[in-house]
Image (cartoon, rainbow, N blue to C red):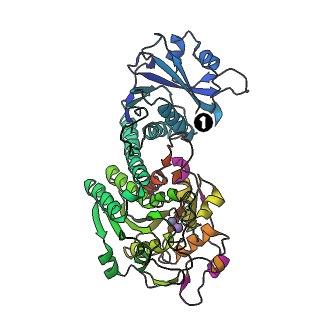
Amino acid sequence: MTSLALADTDPATLAVDAVVVGVYQSADNGDDLELAPGAQSLQTAFNGQLAAHFSLLGATGTPGEVTKLASLGTITAPLVVGVGLGRADAVTSETLRRAVGAAVRALAGVRHVGVAIDVTDGPEGALAAMAEGAALGGYRFVGYKSEPNGKEPVKKLTLVVTNAKDKAAKAVLSRASVLADAVSQTRDWVNTAPNELRPPQFAEQVAEAARKAKLDVEVLDEKALRKGGYGGILAVGGGSSAPPRLVRLAYRPNNAERHVALVGKGITFDSGGLSIKPAQNMWEMKSDMSGAAAVAGVMLAVAALKLKVAVTAYLPMAENMPSGTSYRPGDVVTMYNGKRVEILNTDAEGRIILGDAIARACEDKPDYLLETSTLTGGQVIALGKRVTGVMGTPELCERVRQAGEASGEPMWPMPLPEEIRKNMESDVADLLQISSGMDRSGHMLQGGIFLSHFVTEDLPWAHLDIAGPAYHAGEPYGYIAKGGTGVPVRTLVRLLEDIAANG
Ligand code: BES
Ligand code: MN
Ligand code: ZN
């Protein structure tokens, strides 16, 4: 990951290996590029020809476009880099986050990068966004290659701003580093091969990171789960030779007025179980623990930021495998809260471990409950790969959506309709796991409705279905690498900050 610094020096004399400037698309779709504020002294060093040179090299200023130019002694840095920001009147904080992320990725192999984009009159949160984009754009999963290949991520990035010495600017930078650390840790867990991250190992790694962050840690193993009556987690984990776990992390500052419960799905591999998945893309189900990884990341950030809000996290972990000890379609499972669930498809396993964890979280009597999971393929069908579906109590869902928007993690509220609730009534048990006849309509909503049965009445709650957004299988873009994205770590931290400040 790239480390961050601030400077208020002239970017033309900045001792770095490359200086990045912003390039706007021309307002009238003509050829004339405009440089974003912050590039004046460079423009002067280039005799007013810097924008023209970028244009000559084919730059158009479209968002995320990167154009490199040798400075040939005109300025201290040997390289000037133009990064597209789109139309000047349409720049958002996410534009800047992605642009700086794209520049950092394109500059892999360069040691020290300066960014000369002055955001004094920029969108809200502009400096924070550039800092986050820089740190996250420099993320790389170390992986398993005997010989590391590819170029080293940018080591250090200096943001040139006029208020570099202000306390506020320094605080923005350190918050961005904390967030980037949390997101990177989350991405690392998601990207880890599933044979190296089975439930006992995942629990141990989360516990170790949490202890270092001075969080309270409790890990329930299979014996403790049996004793505690966690029928859902045990049913799903029963098919695997690696037993399930339930990790509880607690953050308890002195002066908290609110208490928030977090829950994250930790299926370390989802084969579907006896209702086995097709072979194609099954490997991607190593990312089915993204919710748990994100919640663990959030806890590390909350502790580092010393937020004035109490937070308790529950991370149910299991491996969903087919075997002679697997749970079966037709089984009736007794959940932690005593409700009995009729299983119809062992591939709808997330809600079964989450029902237990949510019911347990509610016993702590939190003021809010936030749960996140790669729960349904229906989310991807309905909202695509980049927009998280949010279900629960409307006011909290709206707060989640706003926190998502400000964080560059788009989210959209989804309903929990009565008729689907009715379709999940069982003939023999309290509740069906999925709609009868395996009716796939409103699949994402079925997931939300199932979970609602485990939430205490009147508790504000939200379920974030991140099946698509948690994992990026395509080419990198902005500050998003291939693999785990770390969604929704930044949204949840932001919402917790909001709750700490406003209740
Ligand atoms: N982990 C999957 C959901 C998923 C799908 C996550 C695609 C990421 C990408 C979940 O456990 C699952 O298998 N859901 C099934 C349930 C169905 C069989 C009732 C689904 O959504 O298809
Ligand atoms: Mn599944
Ligand atoms: Zn799953």
Residue 413 visible here: no
Q: Does the residue labelled 1 lie within 8 Å of ligand 1?
A: no
Residue 309 seen in the figure:
yes
Q: Where is residue 132 in the image (x, y as percent from the top left)?
A: 45, 40
Q: Nearer the viewer, residue 149 or 160?
A: 149
Q: Quadrant of residue 246?
A: bottom left
> Position of 416 compared to 239: left or right?
right
Q: Which stretch did the figure color magenta?
A: 403-431
The C terminus lies in which quarter of the figure? bottom left
166 left or right of 463 in image: left
Asked whether, in this view, residue 240 is left or right of residue 402, the answer is left
SS state under label 1: loop
Where is the N terminus found, in terms of image quarters?
Answer: top left
Residue in the picture at 51% in, 54% down: 470
* Residue 5, image x, y percentages: 37, 31
Viewer-nearest residue: 343 or 261 = 343
Residue visible at 54% across and 80% down? 329
Amino acid beneath label 1: Val
Where does the image place residue 418, in percent across and percent down from the top left? 65, 77
Q: Nearer the viewer, residue 489 or 304?
A: 489
Q: Is residue 150 above or below residue 294?
A: above
Q: What residue is shown at x 43% (from left), y 50% (from top)? A: 187
Q: Quadrant of residue 56?
A: top right
Residue 429 lies in the magenta-colored region? yes
Q: Name the residue under label 1.
A: 91
Question: In the picture, residue 89 is in which quadrant?
Answer: top right
Q: In this view, does 265 lie above or below 284?
A: below
Q: In this view, does 295 lie above or below 220?
A: above
